[in-house]
Image (cartoon, rainbow, N blue to C red):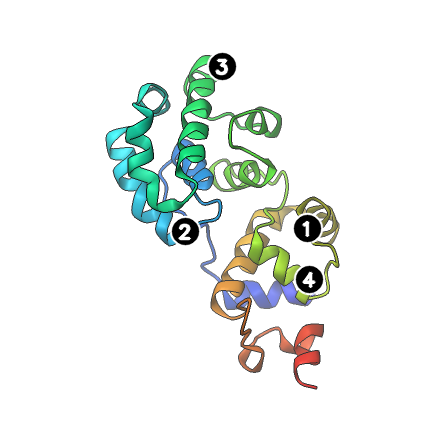
Amino acid sequence: MAQILPILKQTYPDAHCELDHKGPLQLLIATILSAQCTDVRVNMVTPRLFAEFPDATTLASAPLARIEAIIQSTGFFRSKAKNIQDCCRALVEHHGGQVPASMNALVALAGVGRKTANVVLGNAFGLNEGIVVDTHVARLSRRLGFVRSDDPVKIERSLIKLVPRSDWTLFSHLLIWHGRRRCAARKPDCAACELAALCPSAATARH
């Protein structure tokens, strides 16, 4: 990790969250929508959603069918719409319509697990409470030999021990960017990979 992290930072100096958002609420909703969906698709949907329902209060009282119609293309839209509305109702009732900057408070909201909470805390509040483990982070963590597990909870626990806390949020972005731009699931570009010399999977691919 001591060698890999600096290379990733040099390779992706602009790495950041690719879910378009303005403020914690928009990021929270966008992250809920991103489950089993690409960031590109979410970014196509959220401008319309937030134009009609700009805050937790309007989302909490919106016709559920209207939310469903706007977010339909993100998949699992009925459960996502219900989670968004239930989440926003809880924000209005218990948090003054604001997104709390607390892991425990966030995971108590509908549709919010530890991964979503980490996204919001790290990117909206600048708090390194954990490491986001999405499909890219999980895949690359195994390929790079950081972990053997498929369990996101176990992967996060392992990564937290390896990565300096100040880099927890950035580390997820670096792996996600590398996964999207170089280390694809089916055809990783090992020949051009900046980490090839340090990656056990690249060594295997050469033989």
The first of marks 4 and 2 along the sequence is: 2
The answer to whether 205 is drawn above or below residue 93 in the figure is: below
The first of marks 4 and 1 along the sequence is: 4
Q: Nearer the viewer, residue 65 or 158?
A: 65
Q: What is the CA distance from the residue labelled 3 to the residue labelled 1?
A: 34 Å
User: Helix or strand or loop: what does disc 1 sit on?
Assistant: loop
Are the residues flagged by discs 2 and 3 in contact, CB closer than 8 Å? no
Q: Quadrant of the N terminus?
A: bottom right
The answer to whether 125 is drawn above or below residue 173 in the figure is: above
Residue type highlighted by circle 4: Arg
Which label lies toward us, 4 or 1? 4
> Mark 3 — residue?
94
Q: What is the CA distance from the residue labelled 2 to the residue labelled 3?
A: 29 Å
User: Helix or strand or loop: what does disc 2 sit on?
Assistant: helix
Q: Circle 4: is it few (<14), some (14-19), or many (20+) Cα within 10 Å?
A: some
The answer to whether 161 is drawn above or below residue 184 in the figure is: above
The first of marks 2 and 1 along the sequence is: 2
**Residue 46 coordinates in the image, percent (x, y):** 32, 41
Does residue 36 appear to the left or right of 135 in the view shown? left
Which label lies toward us, 3 or 1? 3
**Residue 177 coordinates in the image, percent (x, y):** 50, 61
Which label lies toward us, 2 or 1? 2
> Mark 1 — residue?
164
Are the residues flagged by discs 2 and 1 in contact, CB closer than 8 Å? no
> Mark 2 — residue?
39
Q: Residue at x 73, y 65 (%)?
A: 145
**Residue 109 coordinates in the image, percent (x, y):** 53, 25
Does residue 150 appear to the left or right of 23 in the view shown? right
Residue type highlighted by circle 3: His
Q: Residue at x 60, y 37 (%)?
A: 114
